Image: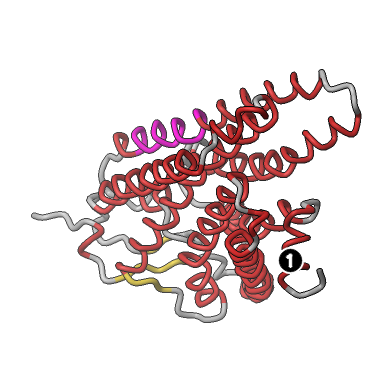
Amino acid sequence: MVIPNISNYTGFFLLGFSKQPLLEMMLFVITMVLYLLTIFGNMAIIILACLDPRLHTPMYFFLSHLSLMDLCYTTSTVPQLLFNFQGQEKTITYGGCVGQLYVSLAMGSTECILLAVMAIDRYVAVCWPLRYTTLMHPRICLQLVAITWMTGLANSLIQTVLVTQVPLCGRNVIDHLFCEVPVLLKLACVDVTFNRMELFLVSAFLLLVPLTLILISYSCIVQVVWKIRSSEGQRKALGTCTSHLVVVFLFYGTAMATYLQPSSANSTDQDKFMALLYGIVTPTLNPFIYTLRNKDIKGALRKIIGKE
């Protein structure tokens, strides 16, 4: 007897909060608003970084790629989520599920590494200001971003191929909001210890190694800033790093809670709310965190709309 794997399925049922219709109506409105803000905020950063010569620096080059990742991530999941929230038919095709899984995992993996690259950029800017233009040459920045994208896309391809080979024995009801590796592994009708261990090790590497680099970079930055006698100089040096640290804690905190926690027998509402947090709220907040106190982006925006 041949046990069917995921690729034998025509579609899946994403239960979401189907037992709480009023909650789904509220989440539909909230998610729609956040998605529109995500599109507006991240598109604004990408456009401004391309059009304004003052933003043609490594910092904004990396930031525009972060915005692109957030746009790709939310677009791979939110439209399907909105469709499921507003109707009784909570299905997703096999191709849609695999595509959603691949794109969201690729963007998440890539963002892990990009945040570390951005921290190194801030470290060089604060600790090696005289050598900054040499160490962060546009060619080097392009190479760093290319490596970041290739690593994230390759990791997602491996994880997607592995999970699509897992036998489900007729199970196609996903008690979650999105198609993600941990929730798909819960449908398996065979031992998936290897898959879980492999996912845990890869996730630990992609989360903890970049996070360690980020913490080391900022510990060095703090030491340098501490030696600056001028309080204005300290504020200026820390101001370029504060926004990035907020994004780091938001992203890594939710990602580690999802991929490094012991797997439970059943998906819970807490898991779903956590998915909403890192899948929708964080990409929405990122552009606003970076722009609210950023004079360069505010100036570029005023210039574009003709007020400067």
The number of callouts visible is: 1
Position of 146 relative to 27 (above/below)? above
Residue 258 picture location, percent across and down: 53, 43
Q: Name the quadrant of the C terminus.
A: bottom right
Position of 306 relative to 110 (above/below)? below
Give the magenta-colored segment's residue range. Answer: 196-209
Question: Which residue lies under the disc numbered 1?
Answer: 301
Q: In the image, what residue occupies the spot 46% across and 40% down?
A: 263
Circle 1 packing at 10 Å, graded few (<14), some (14-19), many (20+), is: some
Q: In the image, what residue occupies the spot 61% across and 23% down?
A: 216
Indicate yes or no whether the magenta region holds residue 237. no
Tell whether 35 sits left or right of 221: left
Q: In the image, what residue occupies the spot 83% across and 22% down?
A: 228
Indicate yes or no whether the magenta region holds residue 201. yes
Q: In the image, what residue occupies the spot 73% across and 66% down?
A: 301
In this picture the colour scheme is: secondary structure
Q: In which quarter of the image is residue 238?
A: top right
Looking at the image, which is closer to me, 84 or 124? 124
Position of 44 relative to 129 (above/below)? below
Residue 55 picture location, percent across and down: 65, 54
Looking at the image, which is closer to me, 304 or 23? 304
Residue reaching furthest left? 1
Residue 72 picture location, percent across and down: 48, 62
- The majority secondary structure of the magenta stretch comes to helix
| Disc 1, SS | helix
Amino acid type of disc 1? Leu
Q: Name the quadrant of the N terminus.
A: bottom left
Looking at the image, which is closer to me, 6 or 19? 6
